[in-house]
Image (cartoon, rainbow, N blue to C red):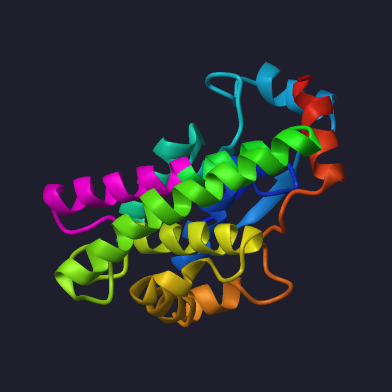
């Protein structure tokens, strides 16, 4: 039996969370090693595990993979969640790049002072409502299918649901003006592997708290 993928990151969302989502959606069990100290992080660097000195790091198929986008692309292709041809893949890439932009804005805001954080959250909500969600509502309306690309479950669907749930943590009724996205959320959330990941006790991480922020700041020294 092949070894389970092993994920090296902080005990929180950050750039690893989309990787957790993708593996969980593919029904793949994985192990995690949490970085809690500067010494642990430095050891990974000294051991040559971090290509550019950064996490996330995923150990899989005899490789030590870094760089979030590269990891996600590899996993999507490996588990048949990356479309059937180049045209479908480039659409998946466009959609996932868009949702990743939105999620990174939310993740970065957690590290800002309270006043700046609230201002940034307000700007994020404005962009979600006027740029990102209208775009995906139109995509779903134009092709009239259950999934974003090729009418087949893909990485794009997984990451859009992740982004929706992150935005809903800031504003629960945000989908009230987007009926197709609301239906999409319900549909994707009920896929068995996704439903399992959304249940309490899974490896899905909660929103960042002060402890997570402090650990990351201490280890990365910023």
Residue 56 among magenta residues: no
> What secondary structure predominates along the stretch shown in magenta?
helix
Q: Is residue 71 left or right of residue 109?
A: left
Residue 89 among magenta residues: yes
Task: Please identify the quarter of the rendering in which residue 134 is found.
Answer: bottom left
Q: Residue at x 44, y 80 (%)?
A: 191
Q: Residue at x 43, y 75 (%)?
A: 182
Question: How far across and down, in percent of the image, does residue 33 sit?
Answer: 72, 45
Q: Is residue 92 left or right of residue 142?
A: right
Q: Nearer the viewer, residue 53 or 214?
A: 214
Q: Residue at x 42, y 46 (%)?
A: 72
Question: Which image quarter holds the C terminus?
Answer: top right
Question: How far across and down, in percent of the image, does residue 141 sit?
Answer: 22, 71
Residue 186's place in the image compared with 43, above or below, is below
Task: Please identify the quarter of the rendering in which residue 94 is found.
Answer: top left
Q: Note whether residue 36 is visible.
A: no
Q: Note whether residue 48 is visible.
A: yes
- Count how many numbered circles sit on residues in the image: 0
The magenta region covers: 81-101
Q: Is residue 11 left or right of residue 155?
A: right
Q: Residue at x 74, y 49 (%)?
A: 208
Q: Nearer the viewer, residue 146 or 109?
A: 109
Residue 197's place in the image compared with 6, above or below, is below
Question: How far across and down, in percent of the image, does residue 19 sit?
Answer: 52, 50
């Amino acid at each position: 039996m092949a070894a389970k993928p092993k994920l090296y990151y902080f005990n929180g969302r950050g750039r690893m969370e989309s990787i957790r989502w993708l593996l969980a959606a593919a029904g793949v069990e994985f192990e995690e090693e949490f970085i809690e100290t500067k010494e642990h992080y430095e050891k990974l660097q000294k051991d040559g595990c971090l290509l550019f000195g950064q996490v996330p790091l995923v150990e899989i198929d005899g490789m030590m993979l870094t760089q979030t986008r590269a990891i996600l692309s590899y996993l999507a292709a490996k588990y048949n969640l990356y479309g059937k041809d180049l045209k479908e893949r480039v659409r998946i890439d466009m959609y996932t790049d868009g949702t990743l932009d939105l999620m990174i804005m939310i993740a970065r805001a957690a590290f800002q002072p309270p006043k700046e954080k609230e201002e940034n959250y307000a700007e994020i909500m404005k962009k979600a409502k006027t740029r990102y969600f209208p775009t995906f509502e139109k995509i779903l309306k134009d092709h009239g299918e259950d999934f974003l690309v090729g009418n087949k479950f893909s990485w794009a669907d997984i990451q859009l649901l992740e982004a929706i749930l992150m935005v809903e943590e800031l504003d629960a009724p945000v989908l009230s003006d987007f009926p197709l996205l609301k239906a999409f959320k319900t549909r994707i959330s009920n896929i068995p592997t996704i439903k399992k990941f959304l249940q309490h006790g899974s490896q899905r991480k909660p929103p960042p708290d002060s402890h997570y922020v402090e650990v990351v700041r201490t280890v990365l020294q910023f």
